[in-house]
Amino acid sequence: MAREQRKLAAILFADAVGSSRLMGRDESGTVARLLEHLNQRLAPAATCRGGRVVRLKGDGSLVEFASAVDALAAAIAFQQTMIEANRGQPDDQAIVFRIGLHLGDVIVEGDDIYGDAVNVAARLEAEAPAGGIVVSRAVREAVTGRLKVSLHALGELALKNIERPIRAFRAEWSAEDWPAHSVASQAAASPKEPTPALALPDKPSIAVLPFQNMSGDPEQEYFADGMVEEIITALSRFKSLFVIARNSSFTFKGRAVDIKEVGGRLGVRYVLEGSVRKALGKVRIAGQLIDALTGAHLWADRFERDLTDIFALQDEVTVAIVSAIEPKLLQTEIARATLRRPENLTAYDCYLRAMQQYYLATREGLAEAIGLAHRALELDPRFGSVAHLAGICHLNNVFFGYATDPRFERKEAIRLVHLALSIDDGDPDTLVAAAVLSGFMAGDSESAIEIADRAVALNPNSFLGWHGRGWVYRNAGLPEEAVRSFERAMRMSPVDPRLHRSFAGMGYALIELGRLDEAVAAGKKALRQTPSLPTAYCCLASAFAHLGRDAEAREAAARLLEFDPTFTISVFIARGGQSNAKLLIEGLRKAGLPE
């Protein structure tokens, strides 16, 4: 049976308290009552909030949720219905449940789930009082400010069979806020007519909700609000994203919200929410990215910094958050597109699939990417992003030695990038493609540098901008600035599937600077991500040769010829961008590669 790892599931574990005592008196009757409570109260409370019941058993019921908010709301609703069910019962006849909640990764196998998150939830349940709920810190951070509930710290608990201590919190709520109506009846009732959801745009769409100020200091509201405004501004610079404006996002300020409702009302697929806590000279910012259609958590992280310059801190955390979620959105969209039937593709779906093939950096992958890009342009001739992607694919065919007709590939690269510029000459990604093209194809380093600098000025948070700038400066014979650009690109997108090209480019620049051990490390990192990358083998062959590691240089050269059988040093120079790579070329000769 196939196993699947699921990220950040909210786990509810419930167990009856003292049921063995009742079993001793009336086993069959107690079992029947337990099942009645679970089927008529716990299951409806869970399914009303989108939960998936994994098992319903008196000695341990398990429910999985996509959202910690939904999990805790369902747990409270269930406990409230149990208060009502036990009303009038003698104390020694009442059936009472304890509940534990945790948010973490799970392993899915068939209909069952297991893993650390399930184990922690089960152990937390044992720490709950009768009729109560205990949650982990992960749940607390996800629900704070979004439900009418108080969470009281229990400290770090040493739980059985859990290696690390778990910080836990006991939930407390007011019956007035959570009336004990019949959840089962509510589930069966006809739903209210929902407000029609706005249609989703044809590109990743996101709203950034106001961050919760958890400092207990109303004067810190400006810091939390300023952080959100900085993030919205930074995301808005990506023309590949549809970002909801600040004024619309802030209509939800100070309200407990349902993420699915936010997505429907604002017409977005993704929602970013977070919290800010300032105390003792430090600031902790927590953020989480949620799929508004499913409630699934796609990304979550915490950032803690010393509070020195408040505006510098805002800039630093904004970069950290944006650099994490922008590539995550693109990768999520690509994964979703690949699940659709090919005959139902739109231009945007073709673009996403082309991106996936482009990442592979193989001869076949680039050919497939070009085909998909042309199909997208047939469907939407004004799709600038797909035009410049196709142009870069043709450029890479020349640069990697894949081209059977380099002249044709060069002409197509120039044509497609110029088409993209005619559609939108202010798009940073298109500008950086034009800069690389100008440097490598036209040999005009001065213009290339000017265009690349303009691209990163338009969007300082763009991985592609800094990556392309690195190659432009490397080509212009300015390796120190090239290394700085590549480092900035890696900081922008530390888990990006395109990093192999940045590592290879950095390796080239490091060779020119004589930092040969670092060049070897960069080349090896490129190969770990893409084992068939010719530029990485060029880097390693040259660096190893300069270091006198002749056997490793010859092995890298042999691997280069395996992936690029037509490689010669003269052809490599003719491909463009090598006029200022004297040490790189010298190393290739030392490695024994053909002239």
Image: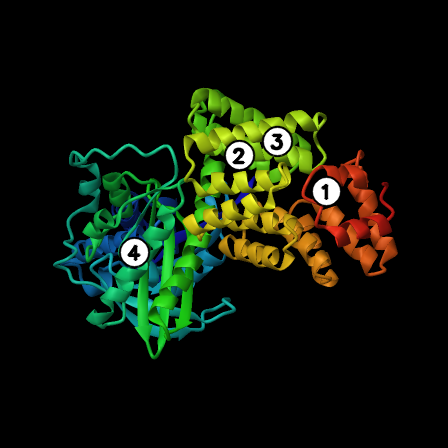
Three-letter amino acid code of the residue under disc 4: Glu
Q: Nearer the viewer, residue 94 or 402?
A: 402
Real-space Cα distance between discs 3 and 1? 16 Å
Residue at disc 2, secondary structure: helix
Real-space Cα distance between discs 3 and 4? 39 Å
Residue 229: numbered disc: 4
Query: Sequence-wise, which precedes: disc 1 or disc 4?
Result: 4
Real-space Cα distance between discs 2 and 4? 31 Å
Q: Residue at position x 73%, y 37% from top?
A: 574
Q: Position of residue 424 (x, y in %)?
A: 41, 34
Instruction: Please give left or right for residue 309 compared with residue 261 in the image.
Output: right
Real-space Cα distance between discs 3 and 2? 9 Å
Three-letter amino acid code of the residue under disc 1: Pro
Instruction: Please give left or right for residue 294 compared with residue 397 in the image.
Output: left
Query: Sequence-wise, which precedes: disc 3 or disc 4?
Result: 4
Instruction: Please give left or right for residue 513 compared with residue 26 in the image.
Output: right
Real-space Cα distance between discs 1 and 2? 20 Å
Q: What residue did someone put label 3 on? A: 394
Residue at disc 1, secondary structure: helix
| Quadrant where the image shows the C terminus | top right
Q: What residue did someone put label 1 on? A: 534
Give the crowd class for mark 2: few <14, some 14-19, many >=20 residues within 10 Å.
Answer: many
Residue at disc 3, secondary structure: helix
Viewer-side label of 3, 4: 3
Q: Nearer the viewer, residue 331 or 513?
A: 513
Q: Position of residue 29 (x, y in %)?
A: 29, 50
Q: What residue did someone put label 2 on? A: 389
Residue 12: numbered disc: none
One can see residue 57 in this view: no
Three-letter amino acid code of the residue under disc 2: Leu
Query: Sequence-wise, which precedes: disc 1 or disc 2?
Result: 2
Q: Are marks 3 and 1 in contact (CB under 8 Å)?
A: no
